[in-house]
Image (cartoon, helix red, strand yellow):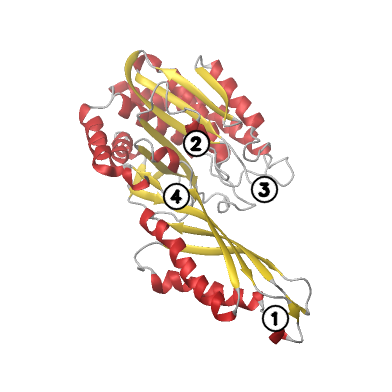
Amino acid sequence: MEPDIKGKIVELSKKEEGEIIELRRDFHRYPELGFAEKRTAERAALEMESLGLSVQTGIAGTGVVGLLRGTREGPTILLRADMDALPITDKKNVSYASRVEGVMHACGHDAHTAILIGTARVLSQLRDHLRGNVKFLFQPAEEGPGGAAPMIEQGVLENPRVDAALGLHVDPDFRPGQIGVGSGPINANTDEVNLTIFGEGGHGARPQTGVDALTVTAQAILAMQQIVSRMVDPQQDLVLTFGTIAGGYRRNIIPDRVCLEGTMRTRTDELRAKMPLLLHQVLQGITSSFGASYSLEVDPHYPALINNSGMVKVLEEALQEMGSVFEVIKDIKPSMGGEDFAFFSRKVPAVFFRLGTGSDQRTTGSAHNSLFDIDERPIAMGMQALALTVFKFLEGELDVQSRINNEQSGGDLQAGE
């Protein structure tokens, strides 16, 4: 990396900081749900056009891609931000609280979008120093049902072909200045579980005449948790949670069916494939012993997000060149949460990191919480981290490219295939 590039990135990011913070607050005031991010997407597209980038809109509905071409030939790196909000009522007492009833940015996607726009502003002013291309991707519906996969299907990794991907997520568990990152699967496979227990209805005063689907369901829920504690290696991360249960008509009627909806989280693709078999094994035993039956559907949702260790090194080395500005927290504990940046990580070498936005100055709340907020001081740091890593990748030494390519050919991406 050219010695003066670091200084220019810091200078430009600080110059843009005020406007980008205001832009983040604007997005926070007017949140939009997945695949309905029309206003947000329009602003992102206008920003990309104003920088002279080649812009595509309407990808997977509301997705936007801006392409910055450097003045010299080289590889292409993709930077991604998610745009969607959540169906949660904003209860914060701040000037930029959501003005859309029942919708708020409770996971920081407003900050992600603003940071990516800021990064595009910085890098576009350094175009003459870029050897290669940068794609700025604004993605819909990360919270569900997922916008990454349809954007990939519509060709965002081509023309020019993307060689690596980079993304971030704000995190109140890290302090401003801290960057959390790890190699391998850092977010879980997430699958949706839909289960119905079928019994035979009857009168509540004569339970022997029916098959009580409710009591069978109670047995089934407890038995399925035995899979987690007794049928799977305890060193393999596994979560099975049922969040809804619905059944019954009134207090004196034995219900003939109960419907459950849940989520299953695994870190390895092997356990992900094995779990439906174990669920069927347990459910068959429980229901048949009571004369009931069941229907089970396990729908794959997001795969595990796999950080390429070569790309992790690129990020770490880029940040280390800044000295004490960043505190890199290595080998962070993997999350059992889902993240559809995973689809990019299964196609190209990728790194996804945590940007510390926790604050001692005010309550920031946890993600998906009605009081969620961020410390805005790290917004400029997020711009710097992305821009520095872009230069480290595009302008980097041949050994950086070599170790990424060697790891890819050695099977790092195969875990998701």
Question: Real-space Cα distance between discs 3 and 4?
Answer: 25 Å
Residue designated by label 4: 174
The 10 Å Cα crowd at callout 1, few under 14, some 14 to 19, many 20 or more, is some
Residue designated by label 1: 210
Q: Is residue 33 above or below residue 293?
A: above
The answer to whether residue 333 shows anywhere in this view is no
Task: Judge depth for marks 3 and 1 and give the one in front.
Answer: 1
The answer to whether residue 188 shows anywhere in this view is yes
At label 1, the amino acid type is: Gly
Label 4 residue SS: loop
Question: Real-space Cα distance between discs 3 and 1?
Answer: 40 Å
Residue designated by label 3: 87
Disc on the earlier residue, 3 or 4:
3
Label 1 residue SS: loop
Q: Position of residue 337 (x, y in %)?
A: 48, 53
Disc on the earlier residue, 4 or 2:
4
At label 4, the amino acid type is: Phe
